[in-house]
Amino acid sequence: MTTFIKIVNRYKFFIFSLLLLIFISLFNKKIGYSSIISASDSFIQMISVLPPIMILLGLIDVWIPRRKLIKYMGNNSGLIGILLSMLIASIAAGPMYAAFPFTTVLLKKGAKFSNVIIFMNTWCVIKISTLLFEFSSLGYKFTIARLIIDIPGVILMGYIVNYFMDKKSLTEVYEKASK
């Protein structure tokens, strides 16, 4: 019985969404059908992206010793930690949800929390592949202006989020990542 409750508790958002979809479908089959098609397309995209990312994460977990990652991205990493976080995220490929497993590995290996936030923000707004498209579509002036705003913003956001996280919450984040 407790295993069942744990499963229901873990997937409560999914179960709620599924029940809501069934309820909506009873009143409007077109919306229900569109939702199912959209969800299956997203699931197929996710399944095509996640396996290579998981393989890469396994390799990173094995190849990069914890002490090295702490040295270059840990609490005393300074500018090197910031630059490395931004470099790794800017050359990464894939949608934002693919960044979350990477952040877990970074936290597990002892990366500074602000560097993890910088990594996530960079993944969202400063990818090289996106910059190339933006450069060709919107021009170099727009791209450079956006980078002049985004790069300091990404770094500032990392430190602001880190500042507002209390020690207990940070400890919980690192403990969950280590499980």
Image (spheres, rainbow, N blue to C red):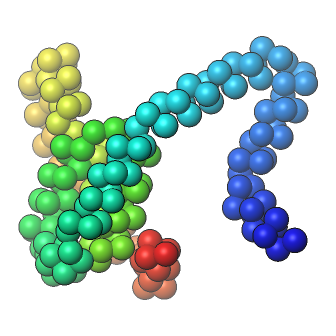
User: Residue 40: percent from the left, percent from the top?
Assistant: 61, 28
Number of callouts in the render? 0
Closest to the observer: 108 or 158? Answer: 108
Asked if residue 9 lies left or right of residue 23, the reply is: left
Quadrant of the snapshot with the N terminus = bottom right
**Can residue 83 be seen from the camera position used here?**
yes
**Can residue 96 be seen from the camera position used here?**
no
User: Residue 41: percent from the left, percent from the top?
Assistant: 56, 25
Closest to the observer: 145 or 171? Answer: 171
Image height of 156 relative to 72, above or below:
above
Residue at the (83%, 40%) spot, across then down: 19
**What is the quadrant of residue 113 in the picture?**
bottom left
Residue at the (9%, 24%) spot, across then down: 140
User: Residue 37: percent from the left, percent from the top?
Assistant: 65, 21
**What is the quadrant of residue 125 in the picture?**
top left
Closest to the observer: 134 or 91? Answer: 91
Q: Residue furthest right?
A: 26
Image height of 78 relative to 51, above or below:
below
**What is the quadrant of residue 130 in the picture?**
top left
User: Residue 77: percent from the left, percent from the top?
Assistant: 14, 75
Residue at the (74%, 62%) spot, across then down: 7
Residue at the (27%, 59%) spot, across then down: 59
Asked if residue 29 lies left or right of residue 11, the reply is: right
